[in-house]
């Protein structure tokens, strides 16, 4: 069973003005679709065929560039669409809010740390909020399409929130102003989904 491009749960223009429709259309319909088809081509006929994306990435040989880049791209964008919503923004609540306070001191301190990780990731990559077994949280970033479930990428745990800081994620609307895009991202974060992922993976 080949991997399929996941459907968006909202329209391309639903995240405006924070993320524009054209960016969403190209990002999902071209970039994510490209990672998906190239991942399928890279695993076809190998012993990775038929495995879950988590299983593939957790046991990844980092020298396998095609699977690293396209498998990472498939997984990362699938998470990205899910953790955004037109009804998003605001603050987390419940267990996740408490875990954020425990790890970072306050929501504002978390926001500062996450935003800084996203802003200072040199070139293309992602910033993450990850949960470790036991429920503790960590903020980190990875280059290109790497992600924390891959072995030895300098960042660990299960990602429950991620922001794409490749220029294709924001350049049409924000040009070189990555910090403005990061600030706007906070208006569309689907904290209900992030909480659900926190509970499922802690
Ligand atoms: Mn992208």
Image: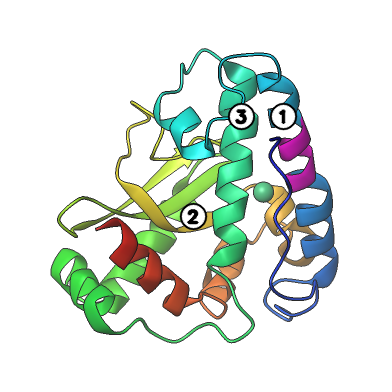
Q: Is residue 26 above or below residue 94?
A: above
The crowd level at tag 2 (other Cα within 10 Å; few <14, some 14-19, many 20+) is many
Compared with 85, 81 (above or below) is above
Q: CA distance from mark 1 to mark 2?
A: 32 Å
User: Seen in the image, is 107 located left or right of residue 170?
Assistant: left
Pair 2/3: label in front: 3
In front of the other: 114 or 56: 56
Image quarter of residue 194: bottom left
Q: Is residue 158 above or below residue 107?
A: above
Q: Nearer the viewer, mark 1 or mark 3?
A: 1
* N-term-proximal mark, 2 vs 3: 3
Label 3 belongs to which residue?
A: 69
Callout 3 secondary element: helix
Q: Picture coordinates of residue 26 (x, y %)?
A: 83, 55
Q: Earlier in the sequence, mark 1 or mark 2?
A: 1
**Disc assigned to residue 40:** 1
| Numbered label attached to residue 55 | none
Spatial CA distance of label 2 from label 3 is: 21 Å
Which one is in front in this view, the residue at disc 1 or the one at disc 2?
1
Point out the stretch of residues depicted in magenta.
Answer: 32-37
Residue at 60% in and 53% down: 78
Looking at the image, is 24 positioned above or below residue 57? below
Label disc, if present, on residue 119 of the rendered structure: 2
- Front-lying residue, 120 or 72: 72
Report the magenta stretch's main SS: helix
User: Which mark is first along the chain, 3 or 1?
Assistant: 1
Q: Along the horizontal axis of the image, is 123 left or right of 4?
A: left
Task: For mark 1, give the secondary structure.
Answer: helix
Q: Residue at x 70, y 59 (%)?
A: 170
Quadrant location of the C terminus in the rendered image:
bottom left
Q: Is residue 13 magenta?
A: no
């Amino acid at each position: 069973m080949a991997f399929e491009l996941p459907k968006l749960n909202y329209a391309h223009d639903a995240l405006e003005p924070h993320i524009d429709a054209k960016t969403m259309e190209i990002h999902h319909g071209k970039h994510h679709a490209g990672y998906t088809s190239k991942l399928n081509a890279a695993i076809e006929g190998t012993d990775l065929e038929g495995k879950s994306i988590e299983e593939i990435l957790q046991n990844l040989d980092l020298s396998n560039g095609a699977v690293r880049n396209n498998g990472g791209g498939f997984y990362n964008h699938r998470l990205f669409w899910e953790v955004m919503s037109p009804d998003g923004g605001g603050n987390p609540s419940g267990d996740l809010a408490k875990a954020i306070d425990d790890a970072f001191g306050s929501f504002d301190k978390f926001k500062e740390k996450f935003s800084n990780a996203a802003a200072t990731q040199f070139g293309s990559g992602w910033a993450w909020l990850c949960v470790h077994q036991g429920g503790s949280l960590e903020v980190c970033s990875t280059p290109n399409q790497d992600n924390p479930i891959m072995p030895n990428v300098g960042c660990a745990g299960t990602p429950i929130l991620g922001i794409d800081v490749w220029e294709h994620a924001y350049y049409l609307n924000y040009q070189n102003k990555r910090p403005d895009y990061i600030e706007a991202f906070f208006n569309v974060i689907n904290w209900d989904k992030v909480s659900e992922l926190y509970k499922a993976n802690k």
